[in-house]
Amino acid sequence: MTGKTRQVIIGNSGAGLSALKAIRQIDADCPITVITDQTERAYSPVLTTYYIAGKVPREKLFITDGAFYSDLGVDLVAGKRAEAVDTASQKVVLEDGSKIDYDNLLIATGASAKKLSIPGGDLPQVRTLRTLEDAEAISDLAQKGVKDIVVLGAGLVSLQTADAVYAEGMNLTFLVGSNQVLSQNVDKSCAEIVKAQLESKKAVIHFGTDAEAIEENKGRAVVVSKTGEKYPADVVIVGKGVDPNVQPAQEGGIAVNRGILVDEYMRAGSPNVYAAGDVAEGPSFHTGQPEVMATWYNACNQGRIAGMNMAGKEEPFIGGLNRNITSVFDTTVASVGAVKRLEGGDAEEIVIDRAAEGIYRKLLLQDDVVQGAVLMGRINDAGMALNLIQKRVKISPRREMPDKSLMDLRRVYCAGVNPSA
């Protein structure tokens, strides 16, 4: 025993690394152990589609080098899965039966892509994208020659993966359970512009349907829809969301709903246990209610807050907030905060819709306070949109905003914080 606080982190991605850095900035000497079931160095999952598309070499995916952990005085336990947390004795139980003691523990185990629970959902042509291993499998399939791509879902991951694999001349079919693309990220008007862009690539989109089974025929997959149509595919891309990796917490009796329930200090309801990132279900910025928000931005923010609190510097989390920026099929879209009307209050939307120019910009207000933004075509001020939301800027009256200010959110910000300017 050193007498110093033993900090243990399960997870080696955005949340875990952010927590590690935050702890070290406050406490230069405490022992830190990072446990990961991965043998690869930490990498950026947001770059995996660029790797599949051949735009980023494999080596550029990694965000740590061999000296990262030793330079920070961290004991890295790699290639071992954490099976359970023994909260009574404050130990992490690994898959080989060994145990690691902790004084403070952060569970940052992330989430796994939802798998298909239909016949044929485990065929080799059926792929999700969540890990580097997934990206390499999709890349291998693409290099064998792809003519037909069937995509189940039309969320961010589905569109980004399809874009990475797609080349001119391929047949692209989407089966979408909802009534629009990017249903969790943009509003209906913006979605229609994205849909038109997909259709310009000869994509065929079927809304209100899904796969009922996947068959194999001469080395290819055949997707059978719930309405009985059959779609041949060299690759089936599945984007059905994620499931938080809560097993270690569940085994330790830590409170779990969809994710591990945490408060505004990222405490997990068990003494000296914290959770952050895609595995955590914490307060929403807009509603204060528990929510899993599986984004890289949110994971890093939660991890940083968890690390500060573990190191003894009490700091609350402002709440989970959507922030996604992506480029798919020649279209760049940013969504920040709420993109659809919240319950209660006087809601209003201020919109510029220039679909012919590929530009769409919307601010969502509630009681004149900025709650969210959807930006398409011109997204250079997405960071300012985030600032408007986090600072709860009120922008009333809105003098000629649709024609002037909305094309430059710095003007919106200035009008809100200094209405007389």
Image (cartoon, rainbow, N blue to C red):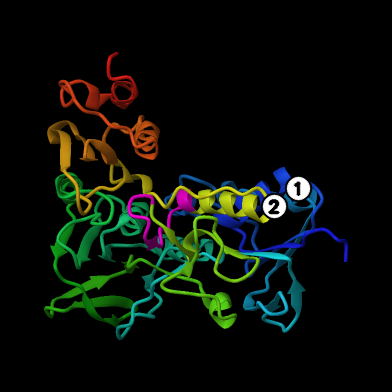
Q: Secondary structure at mark 1?
A: loop
Q: Position of residue 98 (x, y in %)?
A: 75, 80
Which of the pair 264/250 is nearer the observer?
Answer: 264
Vertical placement of residue 26 versus 134, above or below: above
State the predominant SS element of the stretch in magenta. Answer: loop
Range drawn in magenta: 285-298
Q: What residue sits 17% from the left and 31% below the top?
A: 357
Q: Position of residue 31 (x, y in %)?
A: 79, 58
| Callout 2 amino acid | Ala
| Callout 1 amino acid | Asp
Vertical placement of residue 357 versus 27, above or below: above
Vertical placement of residue 407 versus 305, above or below: above
Q: Whole-Å distance between the Cαs marked 1 and 2?
A: 7 Å
Quarter of the figure with residue 416: top left
Quarter of the figure with residue 30: bottom right
Determine if residue 157 is in view. yes
Does 317 sit left or right of 163 as displayed?
right
- List the single residue furthest toward the right: 2
Which part of the image, by quadrant, shows the N terminus?
bottom right
In the rendered structure, find residue 224 and report the number of the disc placed on it.
none
In the rendered structure, find residue 27 and report the number of the disc placed on it.
1
Q: Secondary structure at mark 2?
A: loop
Which of the pair 237/388 is nearer the observer?
Answer: 388
In the rendered structure, find residue 311 and report the number of the disc placed on it.
2
Q: Are marks 1 and 2 in contact (CB under 8 Å)?
A: yes
Q: Position of residue 18 (x, y in %)?
A: 60, 50
Determine if residue 17 is in view. no
Residue 134 is one of the magenta-drawn residues: no
Vertical placement of residue 399 versus 386, above or below: above
Which of the pair 253/187 is nearer the observer?
Answer: 253
